[in-house]
Amino acid sequence: MANGALPPAELADKDAASGTESFVEFSDNRLLIDLCGEYDRNLAQIEQQLEVQIVRRGNRLTVMGERLARTRAIEVLGQLYARLEDGRDVEPGIIDGEIRMGGSGPLPAALGAAAEQMELFQGGKVEIKTRKKLIEPRTEAQKAYVRSLFENELAFGIGPAGTGKTYLAVAAGVSMFISGEVDRIVLSRPAVEAGEKLGYLPGDMKEKVDPYMQPLYDALNDFLPGKQAAKLMEEKRIEIAPLAFMRGRTLSNAFVVLDEAQNATAMQMKMFLTRLGEGSRMVITGDRTQVDLPRGQTSGLADAERLLSNIPSISFNYFTSADVVRHPLVAKIIEAYERDV
């Protein structure tokens, strides 16, 4: 609970007396304005997601609804207020993450050398530091995945679109790069068309493959200033390349990400996994439901999952529609398709 809010014991007493209402008071009206958001939109988001009603009177917020929902809403309000006290911002994605996480225990005391890349703060939450922003896991599955990225030399993230698999992997790579733990970042994905034939594309090799690599550029630009990212790519300290370009290489002291791994063949996956060199970390991400390989071709992701799942120090993290952090409709769309299978 935030320093400026009533302690949980007092909240419980007020709750018992009123039966259907709980309230919390905040001492700093300026921070309270930021907590509520423009036109109280932050309160509206909490109301919608937790099915409560929140009424503001002065520096007091009264929460009405089911007991458990009220308690959770009070916790979320306190956590968000604490962020504001620390000079952090509050935005829809942060609110969504606070609601989803639902309180969590502390992280393990030792995470190895990579622990310095993560800031542990109240509630055992994890932040990935990059040049442009701090990235916070918004679901328990994302949090477990981030742990795996820092604890294991080879990690798999498997699940539907919109669950942050690639985004968090690139963030972890940038964090390790700027801290000096790795010397370069290599981002790759198969150049496979998503169910349609585009024919011959104009331009040189880079111009031909860039459309396939654009999601990786987008993620990278979220974490590094544009000029710095361009300079690092020019110096080959950050590489974004199709999977076919990986053959014959040994990737040492690098953070390596293979995105859309479901579209790698079994032979391509074996080739890519054996590129892992000394001092490197490798992350494989993919969605088993979106395979664009020709009919009858075995997905390298499924093959690797079958062959490697029992090897120590290789982690497999799985996501579901509940972990989708895009528009809420995306989760409903994924669930509808899953039911139709």
Image: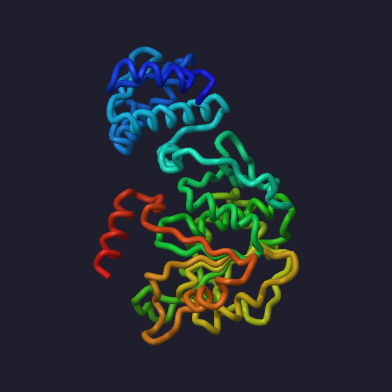
User: Measured along the vertical axis of the image, is residue 24 above or below residue 282?
Assistant: above
Residue 55 percent coordinates (x, y):
30, 21
Q: Is residue 221 left or right of residue 332?
A: right
Q: Nearer the viewer, residue 273 or 107?
A: 107
Residue 100 percent coordinates (x, y):
42, 43
Q: Nearer the viewer, residue 291 or 207?
A: 291
Residue 234: image quadrant is bottom right
Residue 250: image quadrant is bottom right
- Residue name at image x 67 percent, y 82 percent: 248
- Residue name at image x 50 percent, y 71 percent: 261
Q: Residue furthest top?
A: 58
- Residue name at image x 71 percent, y 50 percent: 179
Q: Is residue 35 left or right of residue 84?
A: left
Residue 133 seen anywhere in this rendered image of the structure: no
- Residue name at image x 49 percent, y 15 percent: 28
Q: Is residue 317 left or right of residue 311?
A: left
